[in-house]
């Protein structure tokens, strides 16, 4: 039987915890070094490092799970590797090779196996690969040196209450600019959402609903997850489509699950905010959130309620959640290539 750390797994929140090992690789003189694990959680940087001056940084998020049969697995890490490479290219950063990305994830998880929560605990090992400009730069240009790192930590649900429906607030702010960086996983996008997030939190809402930055007419995403909707008759899975929405791996997976496992019609299209009151269900999806049902959208004094509101998730959302988490935990047969075994 696998040895695990002595901790209350069911009480974990979504917060940082320093584990035993982390992965580090440095890019210098045009190439990445071999990379290695280290027990040191600190980073020493030049005061003029590119990350500090011009915010050249990107990151990914994925999870490791213990399955019903005791395997330690990751969910579709190849897509995280590909997305990070695409993000790096857009930010004029060197790509970290996709095959090395997956090997580095494996190495880091294996070095921290005791922190992988046991099956049935409702928790998982969150994996955060990230890259930033470490070389000094003062003129506005890409840096010459970079660092790629991976940290891991056991986490519980992103939103308190797990799969219990939440309420979100329509934001007056924009998460990203048209033709900007909304489609890549860059830290600067999340910095842009923090002010709006604090306003929502002060008003009693754990998340925002951002509308499109050009017309404020179409639903985009929240500060940290994609939206989806279920049609009024329950037959169609609908997800917003826009050039400034991050292409969520969880959302892409739900599209497949909805169509091929639940037999729903699928629409990936611009979703007008004016039509969401016609939908029967709404939810957020992403690696951290997995699926978080949305029971209510607050729009400047008006509440739009889906199904039973904040009481319980809708029936389609329940099915989606059960199928997706079942795939991740090994109780539902996974499509080819979705589950990557680490240990």
Image (cartoon, grey):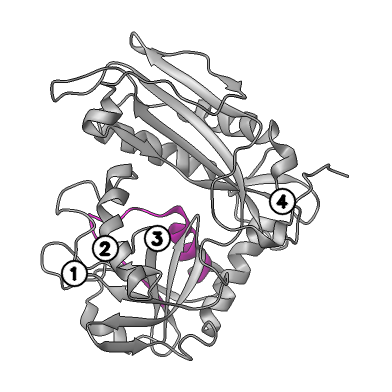
Numbered disc 4: secondary structure: loop
Magenta part of the chain: 237-258
- Residue 172 disc label: 1
The residue identified by callout 3 is: 225
Q: At 62% across and 63% down in the image, what residue appears?
A: 325
**CB under 8 Å between discs 4 and 3:** no
> How would you rate the neighbour count of disc 4 (Cα within 10 Å): few for under 14, some for 14-19, many for 20 or more?
many
Residue topped by disc 4: 117
In terms of sequence position, does the residue under pointer 1 or pointer 3 come before the other?
1
For marks 3 and 2, give the one nearer the viewer.
Answer: 2
How packed is label 3: few (under 14 Cα within 10 Å), some, or many (20 or more)? many
| Residue 253 is a magenta residue | yes
Disc with the residue nearer the chain's start (4 vs 2): 4
Q: Which secondary structure, mark 2?
A: helix
Say if mark 2 contacts mark 1, CB within 8 Å. Answer: yes
Q: In which quarter of the image is residue 178?
A: bottom left
Residue at 32% x, 63% y: name it.
Answer: 198
Tell me which label, 3 or 2, sits earlier in the chain: 2
From the top left corner, tell me how far across and down residue 79 is, in percent: 46, 43
Task: Name the front one of labels 4 and 3.
Answer: 4
Q: Which of the two discs, 2 and 1, labels the residue nearer the N terminus?
A: 1
Asked if 10 appears above or below 6 in the picture, the reply is below
Residue 153: x and y, percent? Answer: 60, 44
Tell whether label 2 touches label 3 (CB within 8 Å): no
């Amino acid at each position: 039987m696998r040895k695990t750390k002595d901790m209350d797994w069911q009480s974990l929140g979504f917060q940082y915890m320093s584990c035993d090992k982390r992965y580090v690789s440095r890019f210098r003189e045009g190439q990445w070094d071999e990379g290695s694990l280290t027990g040191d959680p600190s980073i020493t940087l030049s005061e003029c490092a590119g990350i500090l001056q011009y915010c050249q940084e990107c990151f990914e998020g994925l999870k490791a799970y213990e399955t019903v049969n005791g395997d330690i697995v990751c969910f579709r890490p190849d897509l995280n590797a590909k997305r990070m490479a695409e993000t790096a290219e857009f930010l004029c950063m060197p790509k970290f090779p996709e095959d090395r990305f997956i090997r580095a994830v494996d190495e880091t998880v294996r070095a921290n196996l005791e922190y992988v929560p046991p099956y049935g605990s409702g928790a998982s090992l969150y994996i955060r690969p990230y890259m930033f400009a470490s070389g000094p730069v003062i003129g506005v240009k890409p840096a010459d040196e970079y660092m790629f790192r991976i940290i891991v930590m056991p986490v519980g649900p992103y939103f308190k209450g797990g799969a219990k429906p939440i309420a979100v607030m329509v934001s007056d702010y924009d998460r990203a600019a048209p033709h900007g960086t909304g489609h890549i996983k860059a830290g600067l996008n999340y910095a842009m959402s923090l002010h709006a997030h604090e306003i929502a939190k002060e008003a009693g809402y754990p998340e925002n609903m951002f509308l499109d930055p050009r017309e404020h007419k179409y639903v985009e995403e929240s500060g940290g997850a994609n939206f989806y909707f279920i049609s009024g008759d329950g037959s169609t899975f609908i997800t917003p489509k826009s050039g400034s929405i991050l292409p969520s791996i969880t959302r892409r997976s739900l599209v497949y699950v909805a169509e091929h496992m639940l037999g729903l019609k699928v629409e990936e299209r611009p979703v007008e905010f004016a039509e969401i009151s016609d939908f029967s269900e709404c939810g957020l999806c992403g690696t951290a959130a997995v699926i978080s049902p949305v029971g209510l959208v607050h729009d400047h004094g008006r509440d739009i309620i889906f199904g039973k509101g904040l009481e319980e998730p809708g029936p389609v959302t329940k099915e989606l959640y059960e199928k997706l988490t079942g795939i991740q935990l090994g109780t539902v047969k996974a499509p080819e290539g979705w589950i990557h075994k680490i240990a």
